[in-house]
Image (tube, rainbow, N blue to C red):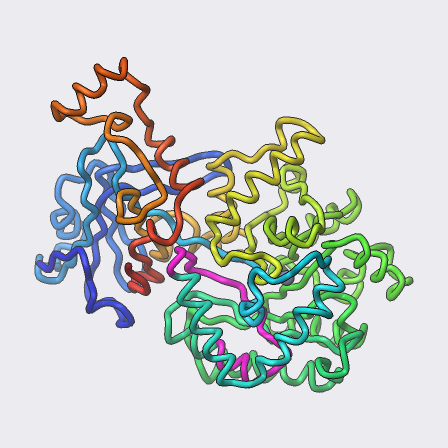
Amino acid sequence: MTKTNLLSDQVNDKPAGFLVFFGTFVDTPKLGELRIREKTSVGVFDGIIKFINTNSLDPIKDCLSYDTSLSPEDVTVVEVTEKDTTQIDGFYFPGFVDTHNHVSQYPNVGIFGNSTLLDWLEKYTFPIEAALANENLAKEVYNKVISKTLSHGTTTVAYYNTIDLESTKLLAQVSSLLGQRVFVGKVCMDANGPAYYIEDTKTSFESTVKAVKYIRETLSDSLVNPIVTPRFAPSCSRELMQQLSKLVGEEDLHVQTHLSENKKEIQWVQDLFPECANYTDVYDKYGLLTEKTILAHCVHLTEAEARVVKQRRCGISHCPISNSSLTSGECRVRWLLDQGINVGLGTDVSAGHSCSILATGRHAFTVSRHLAMKEADRVKLSVSECLFLATMGGAQVLRMDDTLGTFEVGKQFDAQLIKTDVPGSNVDMFSWQLQGTNQMQEQKRDVYKNPPLLTKEDIIAKWFFNGDDRNTIKVWVSGRLVHQT
Ligand SMILES: [Zn+2]
């Protein structure tokens, strides 16, 4: 038996043998449901969860009874120190899913001035994306972003790169090396771009085909997936969208694009595509709405557009930090969820100024409060609902909810280990708020007239509102340890 709390030798190596994770497991199997399973052992082999035993007495015994051919030497135990079962000192949480991240814009994070979408693109975004055709710069940025998102517990990301094919291949390589589960998109734009950052239709399509082929056949890493990426309707000709649509059907590919982010953008789309009933109809008419399409923003969708999104079974990436930063608007998430549309969270770096899905979830919570002040109380999103969007919601958007998003037998072990009590943590709790048995705590509780004890849900809420990468002490993708503090 190998028992370790560090596993330093496991970083960047494939996990060997049977792993069993032991401690408290928290996840959100349904919208609004926070499931907390304590004293639980989760057996993982080849990246996949093989068994889950709640009220486990001995994780090793659980493994041996799961597979009688195993001996204790074959099993590695990854254990969370639990001071007391009545308080959560550490817990496993599913890895976050970021459904919208422009990795190539990361050097601009925090820089947007007072711009709104269209001037932001011209002033800040196209220049930095064009600059990343330099592979040395690109490599530095990709390494930084992938390491950073992993350190914040994000195990799956849908990335937009740039229009450049070679740097798109590089992004796929770096993702593969660092072990993140990713969708890598070469941005397509053959219309309305600046002279220094635009492609012709043929090049745009052919380099997309080459990127898909490279990722699937040459790189051939099950964690790295291609995704067809028409930037947004104004950047794409009808011909290009039709060609991409054909490719998507033939190769069964995911698609990502932007929809209904900003009112000026919506008017521009109407002017450019007078034959279409609305913005959503542009993508529908040219064949880009499938059940594997991720539509970012959807801030100003009409009832008719939402019905089409629902009919085509597309997913929506809610990017609240970006929507607030560029004053795009407030996405009506409850309205979308009520219609049965899948919604996940997107950082939308760099219009979004944080790589963290936890920070994005907090902002989703706040934006829903702002909407509630104008609409009704029920549009507020709860902590557990925001955590659902951050994990299962994202998995649903990617159509990977049968393999990601919660801890279930048969799913991939994509997880983060959270601890609240770590040096420098911003999650402050006082000993007298926590259940305990030592005399000092009891005396303090007397002095303070028995202040209310924190529930487990309270502790998770404190992490949600105050936590950051300091609390994310280990991260696994498909059972492989890819980050530790
Ligand atoms: Zn975006």
Q: Please state, as top left, top right, bottom left or bottom right, where the C terminus lies in the image.
A: bottom left
Determine the residue positioned at 39% across, 55% down. Answer: 153
Residue 465 horizontal/vertical position (percent): 44, 40
Q: In the image, is 65 to the left or to the right of 419?
A: left
Image quadrant of ligand 1?
A: bottom right
What span is in magenta? Answer: 151-171
Count of picture labels: 0
Q: Is residue 379 above or below residue 18?
A: above
- Between 209 and 476, the residue placed more toward the observer is 476
Determine the residue positioned at 68% across, 48% down. Answer: 310
Q: Is residue 439 above or below residue 224?
A: above
Q: In the image, is 95 to the left or to the right of 124?
A: left
Q: In the image, is 40 to the left or to the right of 317?
A: left
Q: Is residue 391 visible?
A: no
Q: Is residue 442 above or below residue 103?
A: above
Q: In the image, is 167 to the left or to the right of 262?
A: left
Residue 31 horizontal/vertical position (percent): 51, 38
Q: Is residue 288 visible?
A: yes
- Between 216 and 485, the residue placed more toward the observer is 485
- Between 234 and 138, the residue placed more toward the observer is 138
Q: Please state, as top left, top right, bottom left or bottom right, where the N terminus lies in the image.
A: bottom left
Q: Is 448 colored magenta in this rendering? A: no
Residue 449 horizontal/vertical position (percent): 27, 13
Quadrant of the rendered structure where residue 143 is? bottom left
Residue 306 horizontal/vertical position (percent): 73, 46
Q: Is residue 194 above or below residue 438?
A: below
Quadrant of the rendered structure where residue 193 is? bottom right
